[in-house]
Image (cartoon, coloured by chain):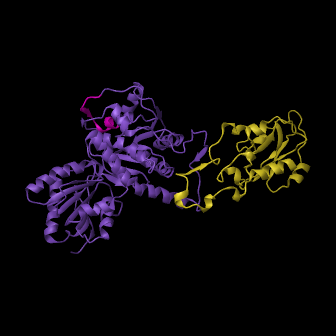
Chain colours: A yellow, B purple
Amino acid sequence: MAQHKDLVNNLYKSKEHFEKSVFDMGWDELVLGAACFSFEGEIDHTVVNVQPEDRRSAETNSINKYVGDWRVVKPVWQVDLCIDCQNCWLYCPDTSIISRDKEMVGIDYDHCKGCGICSEVCPTNPKSLVMFDENTKNEDALMQWPEKTKKGE
Amino acid sequence: MYRNKRSMELKTVEVWDGNVANSHALRQASVDVVSAYPITPSTGTVEAYASHNANGYVDGEMIMTESEHAAMSGCIGASAAGARSATATSSQGLALMVETLYQASGMRLPIVLCMINRALAAPLNVNGDHSDMYLANQSGWISIDACTPEESYDLVLCAFRIGEHLDVRLPVIVNQDGFLTSHKAQNVRPLSDDAAYDFVGDYKEVNSMLNFDKPVTHGVQTESDWHFEHKAKQNKAMMDSVSVIEEVFADFEKVSGRKYNMIETHKTEDAEVIVICMGTTYQTAMVACDKMREEGIKCGVLMPRVFRPTLMDQLVDKLKNAKAVVCMDRSAPGGQTGLLYNDVASALFNTSSRPLLSNLIYGLGGRDINIENLSDIFKDAQAEVKAGKLNGSIQRWVGVRGPELNYYSVEG
């Protein structure tokens, strides 16, 4: 879990990272129209080989924003059951499953909206991703993990 | 984005109606994406363009959508992706498009909309009045008015240059009267395909989504922290577009010999009575004006060629010596005065000019207005000048059956 926390913390860049914050810009300094750039400056096509936390994300990139506040249920990950099949990583519509070298690392709760797709596509029995009430502590959730279901149940 | 591979041989003078004229302007501008839904009387623009497309004269894409809302949405997507895009609509179609009109202007996408003006229901009516033009009046689109198929052809070509100018980047509406212009074949002197494309030029991408070197999100959300600034920037571009429009009109005169003015005038220099109107009525009014001049009325006619942005300074300059100004609005005013009246009144209010300013509501739903009607309007205004006061009220409905309808009574 420590590795996961570091990764998530690194996704955030401090405000000082940017020359001038868009929050301080006047009308004459804004980008034309209703547009936001994902990265600062032009990107190199090898960006695909650079991990998200190492990319030069623009201030307005949603990676710098906490957008998990409307979640009412959250996925909790049980590392001991996970087989690293990457289904959840593939299906997550908000790229909130963090995986490195085809191994599941954790969940980015700052961007997860609680849609439950990861849990739905999880093939293990019992599931290694289970949806819990947002207010349930992860430690408590792990204690209440569902039992293995038998065929036909 | 690039010149069409196949060009069409055109005669020096073609006989086109307004719709066909539009379609050739779109074809010559080598539009990448036309996303449209048919509606009378603008169907002809899209139909003729589709035929150019099917016959291989256009390299762009034609998207048939399920509604006008989707048609404009298609244009917005294409334009944000980095394509030159255009569409056509009228009346109810424009009404359904309104939500996306604001998206297009706010996202600063230089889409061209060929609008064939038609009355808004109810009662359902397919004929020409300016209620759709007026509906789009605060949508952030530059709005230009054409009286003839040739003017519409010319102004659609100009519209691409204006909207795509790097200092403008705003969508542009080119209006023409439903049926009176859109379905009356008249002489059009088109440019050659090459000359027209040279005039319009290659499309200049700005922050296009298909530029993978600089990924961008279009149509973002801004709350109270940025929305005001974005709108200020957008409106500034609209206000500053005046000089660009003048420049484009001047360039167009060089390639076509046809001169367009921000405000078109006919014999207004020494006129005491000036009638302000738009579309085909401007042409009829010019004929009536000449006739009334023979009868000794010093009269003139004025038409804002550029309806939005509003050209207050230029209106003031053209109207400063008039004694009576009659603003003719071809749209049901909805419990107020018409927009032309409002524009002119607000332009003149802070000046020393105080002509007798009246507002006529006329021609709704395509009700004909002829030379005799307009002659009477000049005569009535002349009588008001002589009397030194308006004839009882500011707003008068003309050409409507039943008892007279006057509103906003004035003393003296």
Query: What's the residue at 57%, 59% (across, down)?
Result: B226
B203 to the left or right of B273: right
The furthest residue to the bottom: B411
Q: Horizontal and vertical percent for residue B179? A: 28, 41
Q: Is residue B14 magenta?
A: yes
Residue B182 visible in the shown view: no
User: Where B311 sits versus B62, above or below?
Assistant: below
Query: What's the residue at 48%, 37% (across, down)?
Result: B65
Quadrant in the rendering for residue A80 = top right
B322 to the left or right of B225: left
Q: Horizontal and vertical percent for residue B159? A: 38, 44
User: Bounds of the magenta span?
Assistant: B10-22
Query: What's the residue at 52%, 58% (across, down)?
Result: A28
Residue B208 visible in the shown view: yes
The furthest residue to the front: A19
Q: Horizontal and vertical percent for residue B40? A: 36, 40
B298 and B209: which is toward the camera: B209
B170 and B370: which is toward the camera: B170
User: Where B74 sits versus B374, above or below?
Assistant: above
B156 to the left or right of A88: left
B199 and B295: which is toward the camera: B199
A150 to the left or right of B95: right
